[in-house]
Image (cartoon, helix red, strand yellow):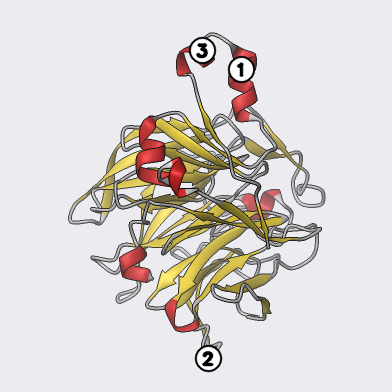
Amino acid sequence: MTPAPATPVVHVDKSHAAKDAPYALSLARSPVPRFVAFDARFIRDVIGPETDSPQLTLIEKRSYQFAHEAGVYIKPTNSVYFTANFQTCDPIELYAINCDTHEISKLDYPDVVQANGACNFDDKVLYCAQGDLSRPSGLVLVDPVTGRAETLINNFQGRHFNSVNDVVVHHRTGDIWFTDPTYGYAQAFRPSPELPAQVYRFRPSTGECVVVADGFEMCNGLCFSPDYSRMYITDTGAIQAHNGPGDGHQLFADPRKPASIYVYDVVDDGTRLGHRRTFAYCDTGVPDGIKCDENGYVYSGCGDGVHVWDSQGILLGKIIVGGITANFNFVRGGIWMFAEEELWFCKLKAKGALVDIEC
């Protein structure tokens, strides 16, 4: 476990950045772990005063992309569950890290095929199983204590999902909301899509599943505001594939495509979305996983770390680890950050919107 030396805090001169592109670019492309404050609220509300020594700690570093997605704290095991990245033809690996000992365990859940995102559902891990060329994509609920797995849904009206990517629970209604982009096809481990890239709401008590949002290049992460009046959805369409199955795993960035966060109003008693508008654009990489803290600030895993905006889309600051951070999760005292070859823990003053419910 290697603490980042002193974890410096960089204060941004926004007036200078607005008319000096090299200066602005230097803020966006630093390989050095640090906090970058664009607004005083980032220090006051998110990382805490510099006198309290906000800290980034490198927990584990490996030679392959073992720390990519999910990030789910389960109280009975006091562990965080996460998934590796897709690496050519190897199955995606599943891991858990004990929050006290930092021991990392490799997991074996055969029913969870090519896992990606996940969330806490009744102290179990609800995985997005992307599927493969012969097995369908869907949502699989795993009890990490017993290892028992149950598929909750694996199709929409008979059509196969593309590659279910991320999932959240509306804790007031019990409904499950999830995104279904076409990355499995783009990375050559899923058949040709049968559906557009869409967002769904699923009611497990009845089996009802409805489309709640479309019009994306690649819908990805999603989360509710603390009061469930808003939903934020990321579009990572700027990450494209060169070709289809066979060599489609060669991904590249297209700056003409979305790297955006959209916000919707949650309407009709928490069952529908309306009034879509652009919330923010990610200046480094794409916004992938997304979550809120109890103040309503919005956090997203981006190309250099985790970026933080206020509820109006004003960039407050960045938690920089120097590499792609697809996802992260709040626990008491901070966030776990999944930066592909690296796993970080960041001590924060801020508390996640769901910490009191899930932790």
Disc 1 packing (10 Å; few <14; some 14–19; many ≥20) = some
Distance (Cα) linking label 1 and label 2: 53 Å
For the residues carrying marks 2 and 3, which lies nearer the camera in this image? 3
**Chain-order first, disc 2 or disc 3:** 3
**Chain-order first, disc 1 or disc 3:** 3
Measured as percent of width and height from the top left, residue 55 is found at 54, 51
Badge 1 element: helix
Q: Amino acid at mark 1?
A: Tyr
**Chain-order first, disc 1 or disc 2:** 1
Q: If the image is split into quadrants, where does the N terminus sit?
A: bottom right
Tell me if label 1 and label 3 are in contact, CB under 8 Å. Answer: yes
Left or right side of 204 for 32: right
Residue found 50% across the figure and 48% down from its top: 53
Which numbered circle lies on residue 146?
2
Measured as percent of width and height from the top left, residue 80 is found at 53, 70
Q: Is residue 335 depicted above or below 311 in this figure?
A: below
| Depth order, front residue of 174/23 | 23
Q: Amino acid at mark 2?
A: Thr
